[in-house]
Amino acid sequence: MSEMNDLKDYLKRRGVSKVGFADVDGLANEFVDLPNGISLVLKLPKKAMYYIDQEDYKSYWNCFHSKIAELTEISLKGEEYIKNLGYDAFALTMQRNECDMKKLLSILPYKTIATKSGMGWIGRSALFVTPEYGSMVALGGILTDMPLEFGTPITDSQCDDCENCQKACPVGAINPQKWNDRLNREDIIDIDACFEYIMDQYKNGLGCTKCMCECKLTQAYLKGK
């Protein structure tokens, strides 16, 4: 598995914070018939929270989208790297993995690859949560037929009894039910209420990041614990 370790090192040198490998056989057929997924996790800089605290959402979104641009470049470089090894690969960029804004859902959610590779779990808010950075992360992915050693999938929430994100939601969209991979997303969050509020905020030049900000693990990351 030296090629796999070299790939992981390469992606980390390009700037990602965490790399994981998952079996996604059958989940990516809408794109290309490639059975293996590579999860790319990029932590958001702590200054992003400063922008939120100052209600400077323009700067926050500029910061966030700059990280998405970084992930796009890393994904495409990873695709090229894998192809140069003689395997097939498909960088799952935002443009390729088109998002349905009304459902707030991509064709193949990055969170699916990330949980299956053991990088983290889904919080009460339906955001992806990592033990190191909470929800202050951006996600990307690569599909490939390169042989990979898969991580252990996380199938149940590792959140404790904390209800910070649920209590912080301004429209009460977050349900008490904790995530597991046997549930539908609608079991843990009212996505219609969430979408309506977010769109209203965007129209006014604002945003809603309360569930991300109030996550206990996000706060621990910001405080450097």
Image (cartoon, rainbow, N blue to C red):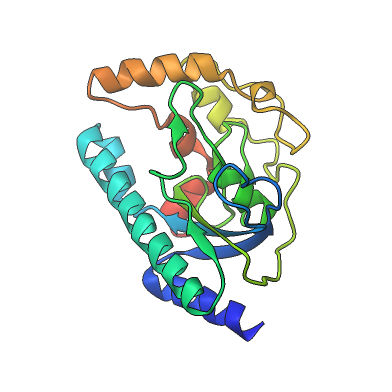
Q: Residue at x 55, y 23 (%)?
A: 167
Q: Position of residue 128 (x, y in %)?
A: 56, 43
Q: Is residue 156 above or below residue 79?
A: above
Q: Is residue 95 left or right of residue 92?
A: left
Q: Is residue 120 left or right of residue 72?
A: right
Q: Position of residue 146 (x, y in %)?
A: 62, 70
Q: Residue at x 56, y 41 (%)?
A: 109
The one of 88 and 91 positioned closer to us in this rendering: 88
Q: Is residue 222 above or below residue 171?
A: below
- Tell me the quarter of the picture where residue 45 sits: bottom left
Q: Is residue 63 left or right of residue 26?
A: left
The one of 84 and 153 positioned closer to us in this rendering: 84
Q: Position of residue 32 (x, y in %)?
A: 57, 51
Q: Residue at x 60, y 77 (%)?
A: 4
Q: Residue at x 41, y 52 (%)?
A: 222
Q: Is residue 101 left or right of residue 166?
A: left
Quadrant placement of the N terminus: bottom right
- Tell me the quarter of the picture where residue 77 sits: bottom left
Judge whether residue 223 can be spotted in this image: no
Q: Position of residue 64 (x, y in %)?
A: 32, 45
The one of 222 and 158 positioned closer to us in this rendering: 158
Q: Is residue 216 above or below residue 149?
A: above
Q: Residue furthest bottom?
A: 2
The one of 219 and 42 positioned closer to us in this rendering: 42
Q: How many marks?
A: 0
Judge whether residue 111 can be spotted in this image: yes
